[in-house]
Image: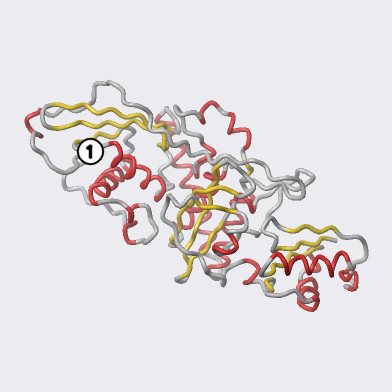
Amino acid sequence: MRKHKLIVPALCCFALCLFTGCRISITLPFGSDQSSYNGVTGVKSLSVPPDYSVADNMEHYDYSHKSALTEQQMEVYNLLIYMLDHKQDSFNFENIENDDFKEAYYAVLYDHPEYIRTGFNYTYSVRTIGGYAQFNAKPSLLFDDPHDMEKAEQDLEAVVSSVVSAAKAQPDPYYMIKYVHDYIIDNTVYDIESLEDDRSSEEGLLPASTAYGCLVQRKAVCSGYSAAFQLIMQRLGFECGRINGTRITETGAHQWNYVGVDGEYYFMDLTWDDPITSDGGENRAYDFFMITDADLAYTHVSDRTLPQPVCRGIRYNYFYYNGLYFDEYDFRYVSDAAQRMREDNGFSVKFSTPDQTQRAVEDLVENQRIFRLDFIKGGITYSVSTSGCILSINY
């Protein structure tokens, strides 16, 4: 969700519309003789070669969606990978229930943000012939024209490759992740208007909810920000996924990321690090850059419907990494941080609890101790983050 700093939080819509449509009566494109499949057990797709071997390895990540599937659902997942790799827009199976298809299909889309051509909405039909059932699913499409779709995929790949190349040139994991974080925020605007778009209905796929919308069109809602970050982080070799939930201050759904680095996990919310300031201008923040479960609990609630790790890493948190995190308020600590950041005409520091932040506000602002810093010549403005743990002072 997008944050309006110093005003009020704006509502954000998590634009992955999870409709499964309804059963419809259509003639399915199964050209095989009925008797050839009587008595078949296990899942089959008539559009996938029998010797196909999937290269996907998501089952090796503890918190991938694939890792949570049943054996049959994983078969469907692997077959869907083939279909999507081969640009299929309609999925045909035998001997499968919609519940299993849905679990596998959603797992593919959550694990693979590069698959932008189809969305979570789909309609399906089941046709029983003799001793077997034919299942067909038709998902929503990003573009109806195949040429438009091909160009969208090529444009996305070009941006991803460029960002990945630049990120790999950074000196360590912190700066790699920061480069991606900053690139997405600096090149994306929150697309509140798209939420009114007719294509956000169950018949269409909202571009702003995809990595394509974020990285190519440069307009996104929270699911677009998180899909773009996940896609680039995966290309860089990091385990990264998406989390569904809500912001405590809101009623609408929201989405953010987790990322694994050096054996530890962190949460990341790029949408809320891309705030609108009180004057309507764009800004970049690090309030939700590589944070822990405890940090997240001040502002977010996960719906726990998707696999997610316990996030306790602190090494790559923005404030911890830059020496701007303090367990307790002490004027000497803040003074040192302010001196180091004096050229920025402001600074932000993070404390372990909101109580420690309040102590800092009382001493620095209310008691005006901040003016003991000789480089502050005029007035100041200050703000406290929605978590209550980050104090920002500008002068």
Secondary element at tag 1: loop
User: What's the coloring here?
Assistant: secondary structure
Q: Nearer the viewer, residue 383 or 61?
A: 383
Residue drawn 11% across the image and 31% down it? 131
Q: Residue furthest front?
A: 355
Q: Is residue 213 left or right of residue 34?
A: right
- Rendering coords of residue 244 (x, y %): 49, 48
Residue drawn 32% across the image and 45% down it? 104
- Rendering coords of residue 45 (x, y %): 21, 38
Q: Is residue 260 left or right of residue 248?
A: left
Q: Is residue 200 left or right of residue 280?
A: left
Q: Residue furthest bottom?
A: 332
Q: Quadrant of residue 79?
A: top left
Q: Quadrant of the C terminus?
A: bottom right
Crowding at dot 1, Cα within 10 Å, few <14 / some 14-19 / many 20+, comes out as many
Residue drawn 18% across the image and 31% down it? 133
Q: Amino acid at mark 1?
A: Ile
Residue 381, compared with residue 331, is above or below; it is above
- Rendering coords of residue 142 (x, y %): 45, 33
Q: Nearer the viewer, residue 157 or 383?
A: 383
Q: Quadrant of residue 194?
A: top right
Say which residue label 1 marks: 96
Residue 248, compared with residue 379, is above or below; it is above
